[in-house]
């Protein structure tokens, strides 16, 4: 019980601090260099990288590689999709790998 409580508290602390960070890194130019099949998964409520501002741009960049296999937008989900809805991420990866 103590270990689990400690894990949860540290996860909450890490998530809170990551959420408050300002991200000023733009990796869009690096997308063209990708050589692996890709799947995009967006959180509709993402405030770190707002969906409305980035989804179309990212889809275009990934489409230009010819390797975009799927795009999914999850309702009621924010930036940390893997923490909020790990099953959705697992599903996206499983579908990508099964192609």
Image: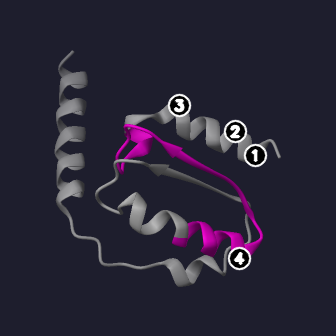
| In this view, 32 is above or below 72 | below
Location of the N terminus by quadrant is top left
| Mark 4 or mark 2, earlier in chain | 4
Task: Give the distance between the C-alpha atoms of the residues marked 1 and 4, in whole angstroms.
Answer: 20 Å
| Mark 1 or mark 4, earlier in chain | 4
Q: Residue 32's spot in the image, x, y percent? A: 65, 81
Residue 64: give its label.
Answer: 4
Residue 65: give its label.
Answer: none
| Mark 3 or mark 2, earlier in chain | 3
As for residue 61 lying within the magenta part, the answer is yes
What residue is disc 2 on? 94
Left or right placement of residue 22 versus residue 95 in this view:
left
As helix, strand or loop, the secondary structure at mark 2 comes to helix
| In this view, 78 is above or below 35 | above
Q: Which residues are magenta?
A: 57-83
Please tell me in which quadrant of the rendered image residue 33 appears. Answer: bottom right
At 29% from the left and 71% from the top, the residue drawn is 23
In front: 33, or 47? 47
Marks 1 and 3: in contact by CB < 8 Å?
no
| Mark 3 or mark 1, earlier in chain | 3
Marks 2 and 3: in contact by CB < 8 Å?
no
What residue is disc 1 on? 97
As for residue 3 lying within the magenta part, the answer is no
Task: Give the distance between the C-alpha atoms of the residues marked 3 and 2, in whole angstroms.
Answer: 10 Å
In front: 59, or 67? 59
Left or right placement of residue 99 versus residue 29 in this view:
right
| In this view, 81 is above or below 29 | above
As helix, strand or loop, the secondary structure at mark 4 comes to helix
In this figure, what is the number of numbered marks? 4
Task: Give the distance between the C-alpha atoms of the residues marked 3 and 1, in whole angstroms.
Answer: 15 Å
């Amino acid at each position: 019980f103590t270990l689990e409580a400690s894990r949860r508290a540290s996860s909450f602390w890490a998530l809170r601090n990551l959420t408050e960070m300002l991200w000023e890194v733009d990796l869009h130019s690096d997308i063209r260099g990708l050589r692996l099949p890709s799947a995009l998964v967006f959180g509709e409520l993402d405030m770190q990288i707002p969906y409305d501002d980035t989804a179309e741009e990212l889809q275009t960049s990934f489409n230009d590689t010819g390797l975009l296999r799927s795009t999914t937008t999850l309702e009621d989900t924010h930036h940390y999709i893997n923490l909020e809805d790990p099953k959705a991420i697992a599903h996206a990866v499983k579908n990508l790998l099964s192609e």
